[in-house]
Image: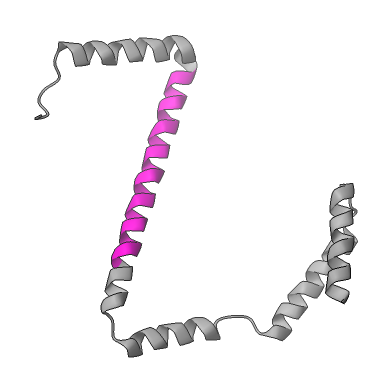
Amino acid sequence: MAAGPLGLPEIAWIGVVGVVLFVVLGPKNLPKMGKMFGATMKEVKKGMNEFSDEMSAAGDAEDAAPEQIAVEQASVVTSELTVEELEALLEAKREQAEAQPVVDADRKVAKIIYEDEIDQ
């Protein structure tokens, strides 16, 4: 079925939907909803383009030489934190958590259980 110019039934449906939206949302909220819809569609399109780019990059990576893949993996490994750095981050987080008062009782119980597991 070929997509041609809009006929009378299509124009009527567009009008009915427009009137319903105008009545439901009101004249003040209708432009806001239109902007939100436009922004959402822009984000969806952006996400689809990023996904497409990643998929094509993955396809290109399969075609790459094994040596190139090994170099890329090695660069990822060397950019990770060392054990000492991770322990320092954990200690800083623990000190930060102790400095803040606990408001939620469940969170306090979870913290106690977590600390017991770490000590073992």
Residue 46's x, y, as percent? Answer: 36, 50
Q: Is residue 52 visible?
A: yes
Residue 41 lies in magenta, yes or no?
Answer: yes
Who's the residue at 39% across and 51% down the image? 47
Residue 26's x, y, as percent? Answer: 47, 12
Q: Quadrant of the N terminus?
A: top left
Who's the residue at 29% across and 12% down the image? 15
Residue 108's x, y, as percent? Answer: 89, 54
In this rendering, would 12 be left or right of 99?
Answer: left
Q: Indicate the quadrant where residue 52 lies.
A: bottom left
Q: Indicate the quadrant where residue 65 lies.
A: bottom left
Who's the residue at 66% across and 85% down the image? 82
Who's the residue at 30% across and 76% down the image? 62
Asked if 19 appears above or below 70 in the picture, the reply is above
Residue 28 or 43: which is nearer the viewer? 43
Residue 54 lies in magenta, yes or no?
Answer: yes
Asked if 102 appears above or below 30 in the picture, the reply is below
Asked if 68 appears above or below 41 in the picture, the reply is below
Asked if 62 appears above or below 29 in the picture, the reply is below
Q: How many marks?
A: 0
The colour scheme is: one colour
- What span is in magenta? 29-56
**Secondary structure predominantly adopted by residues drawn in magenta:** helix
Q: Quadrant of the C terminus?
A: bottom right
Residue 67's x, y, as percent? Answer: 34, 90
Q: Is residue 95 visible?
A: no
In this rendering, would 84 be left or right of 20?
Answer: right
Q: Indicate the quadrant where residue 98 lies.
A: bottom right
Q: Spot the residue most to the bottom.
A: 67
In this rendering, would 4 be left or right of 43?
Answer: left
